[in-house]
Image (cartoon, rainbow, N blue to C red):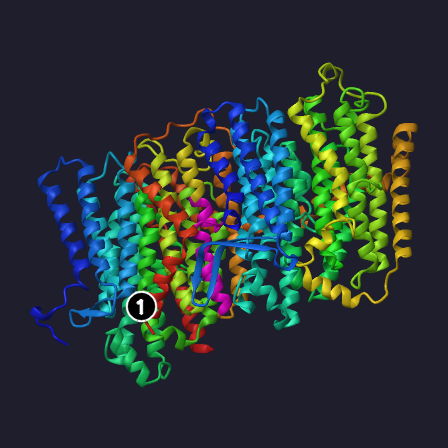
Amino acid sequence: MNDYLWLIPFFPLLGFLINGLLGRNFSEKMVGIIGAGAIFLSFVTTLLTFKELLTLEPEHRIFIQKLYTWMATGNFSVDVAFRFDALSAVMTLVVTGVGFLIHVYSIGYMHGDRGFFRYFAFLNLFTFAMLLLVLGNNFLILFLGWEGVGLCSYLLIGFWYEKIDYANAGMKAFIVNRIGDFGFLLGMFLIFKHFGSLDFDQVFSNAAAVPPGVITAITLLLFVGATGKSAQIPLYVWLPDAMAGPTPVSALIHAATMVTAGVYMVSRASALYILSPLALSVVAVIGVATALFAATMAITSQDIKKVLAYSTISQLGYMFLAAGVGAFSAAIFHLMTHAFFKALLFLGAGSVMHALSNETNLMKMGGLRKHLPITFWTFLVGGLAISGIPGFSGFFSKDEILWKAFSSPFGSPVLWGVGAVAAGITAFYIFRMIYLAFYGESRVDPEVALHIHESPKVMTVPLMVLAVLSIIGGYVGIPHVYMGLEHFLEPVFEPASVAMAAGAAGHASASTEFTLMGISVVIALAGIYLAYQLYVMNPEKPRQLAQSMHGLYTLLFNKYYVDEIYQAVFVKPFVNLSNVFFWRFFDVKIIDGIVNGVARIFGNIAAGLRRMQTGIVQMYALSLMLGAIIIFGYFILR
Amino acid sequence: MNTAIGTIDWIPVAPFIALSVLGFLIMIIGLFFPRIYRETLGTITLVGLAVTFFLILQNWGEPRYAFANTIVGDKFSTVFNGLFVVGAALTILLSLNSQENRYLLYADYFTVIVFATAGMVLMSAGTHLLTIFLGLETLSIALYVLAGFRRENAFSLESAFKYFLLGAFASGFLLYGIALIYGATGSADIQEVTRWIQQNSLTGSLMLPIGFLLLFVGLGFKLAIFPFHMWAPDVYQGAPTPISAFMATGSKAAAFAALLRVALSTQSYTAIAWEQVLWVIAVATMTIGNIIALRQDNIKRMLAYSSIAHAGYILIGFIANNELGHSGMLFYLLSYTFMNIGAFGVISYLSTAEHEFVTLGDVRGLAYRRPFAAIAMAVFMFSLAGIPPTAGFISKFYIFSAAVKAGYVWLVILGVINSMISLYYYLGVVVQMFMSAVEEKAPATATQQPAVALALVVSMFAVLGLGIFPSRWLAVFMEMARSFI
C-alpha cells in the first residue's frame, strides 16, 4: 500500500492541471466536481493508507516512499520522498478531510464568480503544496511545500484583484512571510552544515552529537520561519489583512491548514527543540504572549472575519505554547480540533456573508438567528468548542495544553495563568460576535434585509459535518480510551516524551489537574456571561464602556498601532534608502537623469551621438578605473 | 610540442572551426541570395549549431591539446561550449520575431551571432592567455556590432557605442594583466604559468598577483560585477531584445569560463588570499543589482540590474572555491541561460515592430490576453527569484550550500537576504500579469511567432526539468570540476 503514497499529493496536482488548463471551457458543475473530487480521492487514499498504518506495531508505524533522488553531491543527497507516520497521518487527514469539505462548500460560495475555475485550480494547487509539506521526508521537500502554500495563499488572497487593497494584502502577506522564510532557509543551511544531511531521520537521530549552541541557533531560526507562516508575534500582521480573500480560502488556508504549518514544522523537529531549553522557552513565551495579545485585539474588532483572524492567531499561540513546554502531541491535538471548529466558524461567517450580500461588519448584523437557523446552530457549536466548554472538542485540547503548560518540566504556573486569562477573553469575544450577529435587534441594511436567505445545501452540509467533528473531535484525545491521540503520536515524539518523563518529578497530581480544569471552565463561562450581559442584556453598555475607557479602547481598536509602527520603523527607511540613495542618486540623478533626460529628444541620431560626449561614459570608465585601483590598493597595502 | 599540421589533433578545435565555417557560409548565402527568407537562414544556422554541438560533445574526456597547447578539448570546455551553443540557438530562435522583422539584415546578424559564439568557445577552450584574449575580442567586437544592430534606433546606437568604448577600456586591463603575467613567469601558456607558480612563489613579487588582478578586472567588466557593472543596464536596454538575452547569458558565462579556467588551473586566486575583496565585490554586486532593480518600471532594465545581481550570486560559488561551488556555478549559468533568455524571450514574443512590451504597464492583465506568455513569464520570474521547484532555486541552493560548507556563513546570509529582496520585483511582474485588469487602450500584442514560442517552450521545460531532476546535471558538472584536481 505504501507504494501508493504519492497518489495523495498527485490527485490535487492533477485537479490543478485539468482545471487550470481546461477549466475555462468547463461548466461550473464540472469544475467543482473535478476540484472537490480530486481532494476526495486523496482523502480516500489517505484513509486507506492510515488503515494500513494502524495494522503495524506502534514503533514501526512509518511508511517511506522514495520516488527519486532530487539532488546528490558526493555523500550528500536529497530524495523526493514521502513519509507517512503518525504525525503526517494526522496532518494529512486534516488537510484532505477538512479540505474536501471546504472545496464542496466553495462550489456554493463561489457560484457565479468570474474566476470560478481559476479559484478551484489555485485551491487544488494549494492542497498539493500543503500535502507536500506534511508528507515530505526531508527539510527540502518541506520547504518546497512551504513556499508553495505561501505562493498559493498569496494568489488566493489577491483573488479579487480588481480591489487594489486586496492585491496589497497579498503583497503584505508575501513580504512578511519572506522574513520568516529567511529564518527557515538559514536554519536549513545550518542543518546542512552540521549534519551533512537534510533527511529527517538522519538529522534527528544525530541531534545529540551536535553542540547545543548550534541546536539552539537552528531551532530558533526555524522558529522564525514558523512565526511568519503561523502568524505569531512579531510577524502576525499579515493574517488579518489576508481576510481580503474569499471566505472559504480563509477557512482552509488561514485557519485549518497553512497557518498551522509552523506548528507542524516545530513538532516535526521536536527532537531538536527538546535539546534546547532556551528555544523551547522562546517558543512557549512567544506562543502564550501571542495567545493573549491577539485575543485582546479581537475584542474591539467590528469585522466578523477579522475577529476570527485574531482568534486564529491567538489559537495558534496556544499550539506554540504546547510545543514550547514539550507537549508536542497536545499541540497537534489542538491543531486538529482547531481545524474543525475554526473552519466551521469561518464557513459559518461565509454563510452569513452569503446571506447579507458580503457584509462583514458585525454592527450591521443582529437577529440573524431566525433567518439562518442552520448557520446559527453550527456556528454556536463552533463557538462553544473554541471557548473550551466541556463536551466540545476545544475543551479537551485546550485543557490538555493548559495542563501541560502548568505541569510539564518546561512549563510554569505563569504560562498557565496567562493562557487561562486568554481563554476567558476568547470566550468573551467569540460570544460577543455570536450575540452581535445572531441575537438582538436586526441592524441589517433594509435593502439587504430583503434578500436574507439560508445558504444552499452544498454549503450547509459541510457546516453540519464540521459541527459534528467539532464535538466528537475531542474524544480521540482522552487518555486511556481506545487509541488516544497522544499514545498514537508517541513514536514520533519519542525524544520529547523521554525528556518530559525524566523531568516530571512528582510535579503534578490528578487533583491539581481537576482543580485547574475547573478554574479554566469557570473563566470561560464567565467570559460568555460577561458577553451576554454586555451585548444581549444591556446593548448600550459597550458604547459607554468604550467612552469611559477611551484610551484603552482606542489602543485596542487600532491594534496597538503595530502596523503603523512597522511602517515607520521598517518599511519607510527601506523605501527611502532604495528611493533616495540608490535609485534617485545612482540611477535617476546620474544615469537616467542624463541618459533618459536627453532621450526625450530621441529619434535624432546626431543627438544620440552627442549624448555620448556628455561625460557619462567617462563616469563609467572612471568607476571601472577607481574600482581597479581600490582593489590593487587593498592588495598592496594590506 | 608538435606544430606540424599532420599531427594536429583536430577534435579540440573542431567546434571553433565549425562555427567559423558556419559564419562564413551564412554570410556568403546572404551575399548571393539577398532575398532569402530569414526562417531559411535561421534553420541553416540552427543545423550548423547542432553539428557544432555534436562536435563539442566529442571532447568530453581526458584533455586533448592542439595548436601548440593553446587550445584544449576537455570536460570543462565541453560543458561550457555546450552551454554557449544552446544559448546561441535560443537567441537565433528569439530573433525570428516580428519585432525585428523590418530592419535586420538577417544574414549579417546571424553571422555575427555565430562569430560571437566562436569567440566564447575560444574563451573556454583556450589554455593560453592570448587564446583567451583572442576569444574575448572576437566575442566583444561581435557584440558591439549586435548591440547597435537597430540602426535607426538611437538607444541601440548609444548602447553599442558605450559598450564599445568601455569594452575597449576593459580589454586594456586584461591585456596589461596578461603582459604582467608573461613578464613575471616568462610565458602566457596557462600550464607553463602554473608550473612556474608551483616552483616559485606566487606572491614573491607584486608583478604576478597584480597581473592576475588586472585579468580579473578585465573579465569582471564582461561579468558586469561591481564596480565594473555600470554599462550593463544601458547596453541591455538599448540592444535588440534577443541580443540583450545573449549578452546577459552567453557573454557572462564565457567570462566566467575564462576566469574559472585560469583560477582552477593556476590556483592563483586562492594563493593571492584576497577573499575579503571578492566577498565585498560579491555582496556589493548582489545588493546594488537588486536594490536598483526594485525601482524599475522597464522590464528589460529590471532584468539588466537583476543580471548584475545574478553575477554576484554566481561569484559566491567562486569564493567558496570547492567542488560544489564550481559545479554550482555551472549549474547556475546553465539555469540562468534558460530563465533569462526565456524572460527576454517573452518580451520578444509579445512585442511588435510598433510597440515593445517592456514596461510593467504593458504586461498588466497579460494572463487574460495571452495566457501562454503569462505562464511562461511567471515560470521564468519564479526561477529567477529562486522559488522551488525551478532551476533557479536549485542553483542558489547549490551555491549557498557550497559557501556554507566553506564557512562563509555571513556571505550566505547576505545572499539569502538579497534573494528575498529580489523576489519583490520579480513577483511584481507576476502580480501585474495575473492580478490586474487589462488596460483599456493596451496596444496589440504580436501573434504568429512560432520560433519564439518554441524557444519559450524549450526554456520552460529546461527550467522546470533542471529544477525537478537536477541530479544528473550536477553529477556531470561535478565530474567537470573534479577533472581539474
Q: Tell me residue B192's x, y (percent).
A: 25, 78
Could you tell me which residue is drawn at 37 percent across and 27 percent down?
B444
Question: In the shown orientation, is residue A96 left or right of residue B75?
Answer: right
Q: Is residue B240 magenta?
A: no
* Magenta segment main secondary structure: helix
Q: Amino acid at mark 1?
A: Arg
Above or below, comparing residue B325 to residue A578 in the picture? below
- Local secondary structure at mark 1: helix
Seen from the viewer's position, the closer of residues B179 and A55 is A55
Q: Which residues are magenta?
A: B380-405
Seen from the viewer's position, the closer of residues B431 and A284 is A284
Seen from the viewer's position, the closer of residues A67 and B76 is A67
Q: Tell me residue B26's x, y (percent).
A: 15, 46
Seen from the viewer's position, the closer of residues B259 and A330 is A330
Above or below, comparing residue A308 to residue B222 in the picture? above
Q: Tell me residue B83's x, y (percent).
A: 30, 55
Report crowding for label 1: few under 14, some 14 to 19, many 20 or more residues within 10 A (C-alpha): many
Q: Is residue B400 magenta?
A: yes
Which of the 4 image quarters holds residue A47?
A: top right
Work out whether residue A233 can be spotted: no
The chain to which mark 1 is attached is B
**Which residue is label 1 attached to?**
B261
Question: In the shown orientation, is residue B463 left or right of residue A552?
Answer: left
Which of the 4 image quarters holds residue A386?
A: top right
